[in-house]
């Protein structure tokens, strides 16, 4: 039962308490906003009409509830938005891994424990603390768990602006952070929306390996390596495979080149520390994981959601892009009998690339590397 408004503290005082509670729970930012997303709704509908969501049918499935919080959760009048830094300071240097074709690059947000679980637990603790302070109230916790326009809400709550790469950027701490929301029926004072500070910079646009940032502030997910390696369920279009390089789960390039990330702070959360040396693992080693081993090693990780077959699909592409090696060819040949036709198709593509490299090297009088 929701507590009557007459028993609640002054909204401004409650907002101040929220920030104190949020900081104590490990959130690096907490802001409050209303629920008007009319302009963002129009942009979303245009993006969907252009088909830029690819096969993410769930982006359309819920209609306008994504941009109308009070339709998703009736009674919602305010949204509490939070952010939590995830950049792992002790991980292998990102560019050095990307430049080593024998290594696997995993987006830095996915190296540790599944962030959904971490943020959801903290947001629930925030809600519980509020209940203790003011009594029962209407709320719902979200962390990528329902149709929510989290970046526009976070922008409106003053947590950062949406950059040209469509990620949220905070001028004091860059963009390496997770977002979560608490929809509430509490009439809280809204913060001032963040202003844009991208200026004339186009570093992210120029750095995108597949040209997915088709214009400033416009992303075509169908070209994005994060989409291709995580959300896309089928065969990866051949036109993008070479550009994927050794990126087997997600892509950070647009953030790695962003000037604002010179202010990025490393996380203090042990849950986000890299597991199983995934910050710089050998492609061949990861490709050799059986499904049972993969299930064990990805337990509690965001990576689990793609399944073992997509994992092998992605690594097969990376091995096709890797420097020629007889060990790579042997590893790929070992997966030709895989029961999933999608995996086999990508393995065959990778083998063809490796064999062409070997043939070209022999024709040029260069002895290909052996079983190093």
Image (cartoon, rainbow, N blue to C red):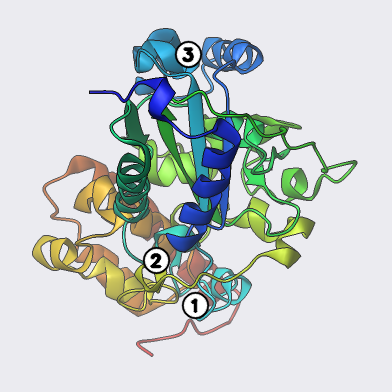
Q: Is residue 151 left or right of residue 232?
A: right
Are the residues tagged 2 and 1 within 8 Å (C-beta)?
A: yes
Q: Between marks 2 and 1, how big is the CA–CA gap?
A: 9 Å
Number of numbered discs present? 3
Q: Is residue 1 left or right of residue 364?
A: left
Q: Between marks 2 and 3, how big is the CA–CA gap?
A: 33 Å
Q: Which residue corresponds to mark 1?
A: 91
What quarter of the picture does the C terminus occupy?
A: bottom left
In this rendering, does residue 290 appear at all? Answer: no
Residue 208: x and y, percent? 66, 47
In this view, 311 is above or below 44: below
In this view, 28 is above or below 340: below
Crowding at mark 2 (Cα within 10 Å: few <14, some 14-19, many 20+): many
Q: Which residue corresponds to mark 3?
A: 68
Query: Disc 2 or 3, which lies upstream in sequence?
Result: 3
SS at mark 1?
A: loop
Q: Which mark is residue 111?
A: 2
Q: Residue at x 86, y 46 (%)?
A: 201
Query: Disc 2 or 1, which lies upstream in sequence?
Result: 1
Name the front one of labels 2 and 3. 3
In this rendering, does residue 268 appear at all? Answer: yes
Query: Disc 3 or 1, which lies upstream in sequence?
Result: 3
Residue 223: x and y, percent? 55, 35
Residue placed furthest toward the front: 6
Residue placed furthest toward the right: 200
């Amino acid at each position: 039962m929701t507590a009557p408004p007459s028993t609640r503290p002054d909204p401004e005082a409650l907002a101040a308490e929220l920030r104190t509670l949020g900081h104590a729970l490990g959130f690096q930012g907490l802001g409050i906003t209303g629920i008007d997303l009319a302009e963002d709704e129009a942009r979303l509908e245009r993006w969907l009409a252009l088909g830029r969501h690819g096969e993410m049918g769930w982006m359309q499935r819920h209609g306008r509830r994504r941009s109308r919080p009070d339709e998703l959760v009736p009674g919602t009048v305010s949204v509490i938005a939070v952010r939590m830094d995830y950049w792992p300071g002790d991980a292998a240097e990102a560019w050095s891994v990307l430049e080593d074709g024998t290594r696997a690059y995993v987006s830095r947000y996915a190296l540790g424990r599944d962030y959904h679980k971490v943020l959801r637990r903290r947001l629930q603790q925030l809600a519980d603390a509020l209940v203790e302070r003011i009594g029962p109230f209407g709320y719902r916790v979200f962390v990528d768990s329902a149709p929510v326009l989290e970046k526009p809400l976070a922008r409106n709550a003053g947590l950062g602006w949406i950059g040209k790469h469509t990620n949220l950027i905070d001028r004091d701490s860059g963009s390496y952070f997770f977002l979560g929301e608490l929809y509430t029926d509490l009439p809280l004072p809204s913060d001032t929306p963040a202003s844009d500070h991208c200026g004339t910079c186009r570093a992210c646009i120029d750095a995108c390996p597949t040209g997915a940032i088709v214009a400033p502030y416009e992303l075509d997910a169908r070209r994005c390596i994060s989409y291709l390696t995580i959300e896309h369920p089928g065969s990866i279009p051949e036109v993008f495979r070479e550009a994927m390089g050794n990126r087997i789960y997600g892509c950070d390039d647009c953030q790695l080149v962003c000037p604002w990330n010179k202010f990025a702070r490393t996380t203090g959360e042990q849950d986000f520390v890299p597991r199983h040396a995934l910050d710089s693992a050998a492609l061949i080693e990861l490709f050799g994981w059986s499904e049972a081993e993969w299930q064990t090693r990805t337990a509690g990780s965001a990576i689990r959601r793609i399944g073992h077959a997509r994992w092998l699909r992605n690594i097969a592409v990376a091995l096709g892009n890797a420097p020629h090696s007889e060990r790579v060819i042997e590893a790929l040949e070992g997966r030709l009998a895989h029961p999933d036709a999608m995996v086999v198709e990508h393995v065959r593509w990778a083998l063809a690339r490796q064999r062409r490299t070997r043939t070209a090297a022999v024709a040029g009088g260069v002895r290909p590397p052996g079983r190093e």
